[in-house]
Image (cartoon, helix red, strand yellow):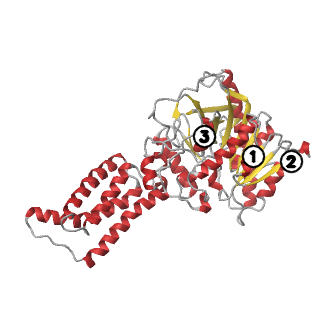
Amino acid sequence: MWQRVPGVEYDRVAENITGLYLSPLELLVLLGAVALVVARWLAPAARPRVTMAAAAVFVPSAIVLSVTGIRWQMLPVVAGAAVASPFALSPLLRRRTGRPTRRARWWLAMPGSVACVGLIAMGPVAAWAFPVPVFPEPSGPFAVGTRVVQWTDPLRPESFTADPHDRRTVVLQLWYPARKGPAGGQRAQYLGRTEQEARTVSDALAREAGLPGFLVDGVPRARTHAVFGAPVAGGGERFPVVLFSPGSGGVRTQNTAWAEELASHGYVVVALDHPYDSAAVVLADGRTIHAKIASTGDRDEDGRLAVGWTAVRAADLRFALTQLEHLDRGENTDPLTGRLDTGRVAVTGHSMGGAAALQAARQDRRFDAVIDLDGYPHGPALPALQQPALALTQAITPATDPRYLPRLTEALRAGTATSYRLTVPGAAHLTFMDSPLYLPPVPSTVGSLGRHESPHVVAATTLAFLDATLRHTPGDLAGVLSDYGDLSVYPSAKSR
């Protein structure tokens, strides 16, 4: 399991102590609110001191939290404390003015105290269910840098617009091995280059999922471990490249924990936003392109549409690789010039992105390996894959599309290189992205592996596969993979 270190915005120490994903300031507000309610039930001699101490902790903490930006999860805590405050403070005020103190009978005060405790308890429960994501610390020897680029393909019209002069533009984020910088450096914002972009993307993702945006308002507050614009690691080593396509409606940052882990082990991960498909894509000129594709609810019609959407994504992946080759040759001035090993490239994706990765690998032999993270293989099954492939799938249940495994098995079995299908027990479709870090741990949605085991399993299995196929690291790949689930190995057609 990856280690944890103090973060920048939300302190992991507080999270480890409470298990509730609260910042230190939120923890003070919670403790002050609880103390205000409890003070009513203490012995008369202790009651004034506890009440004053609770107020001294709660009031300034709540004020600072309101100024810096209070999360909705803390509103019930503030409400519970606000209801309890008059009953806790009025005896003190009466004593200071010389008026006789009054105390309600216990059977009258008990319902009010229970109600306040219930309100206050809603805060940590909500913070646990919808936390600010805390990213696992990358375990590799490199620090991680990140940057965003935007490229336009002059040869390809934009198929999602009617403008004949519009050309296909993609936005890409790169995570790369970087030099270790001073401790406490500013970490990259999650979901965007700026807080505004992160909130735009977060709101769009919430709409895609049918959730009110406020439920996930903690997500754009998160900081990752990568540093924007960090210097590339020294030594002159050339790094293998891993391209990534997100799921339908997904965004380039949806697998940040995975990308940072790979980059820390010496890979350059390049993730794409697919305009008009990704939930929201913020362009360099400030325009935001929202998704146009949508499910019809008809399985056959959706399958037909997905073939076309997958083809666009596969073309985006091939174009991105071409641009990376230009970048590495120095055709554009770039810190990564001469550092990309474009002779060792894997193409990967989640869900529809996995289908796009399979298609791109079929069409372009420049890709040396392919990883499909729980993606149904849309599109033509020919030509057969000539690259080794790894397919990670969620646990198969009666609700799983019965065509999924046969179609995936057919694609892997027909390949001319050894391929692997790993079914991960306890995994759901969203297990293979960052979602377990910030969504409620509902097994049907994010699986039952847990918030920290989910990214670990995805990173460990894919890293073992990449090391074996791109770096030719010796070892028992099948043995490593089988430790994480039910493994099927499909030997190359040449060996059969």
Q: Is residue 309 visible?
A: no
Instruction: In the rendered structure, find residue 261 and report the number of the disc placed on it.
Output: 3
Amino acid residing under circle 2: Ala
Quarter-wise, where is residue 243 in the image?
Answer: top right
Q: Nearer the viewer, residue 141 or 195?
A: 141
Residue at image position (81%, 57%) is 406
Amino acid residing under circle 3: Glu
Q: Nearer the viewer, residue 434 or 485?
A: 485
Q: Residues within 10 Å of mark 3 (few under 14, many from 20)?
A: many
**Residue identified by numbered label 1:** 390
Quarter-wise, where is residue 142 in the image?
Answer: top right
Determine whether the residue tagged by mark 1 lies in a helix, strand or loop. strand
CA gap between label 2 and label 3 equals: 31 Å
Question: Between disc 2 and disc 1, whose residue precedes?
Answer: 1
Residue 77 lies, in percent from the top left, at 35, 60
Q: Is residue 366 left or right of residue 436?
A: right
The reply to whether callout 2 and callout 1 are in contact (CB within 8 Å) is no
Residue at image position (45%, 60%) is 126
**Residue identified by numbered label 2:** 414
Q: Is residue 194 left or right of residue 30?
A: right
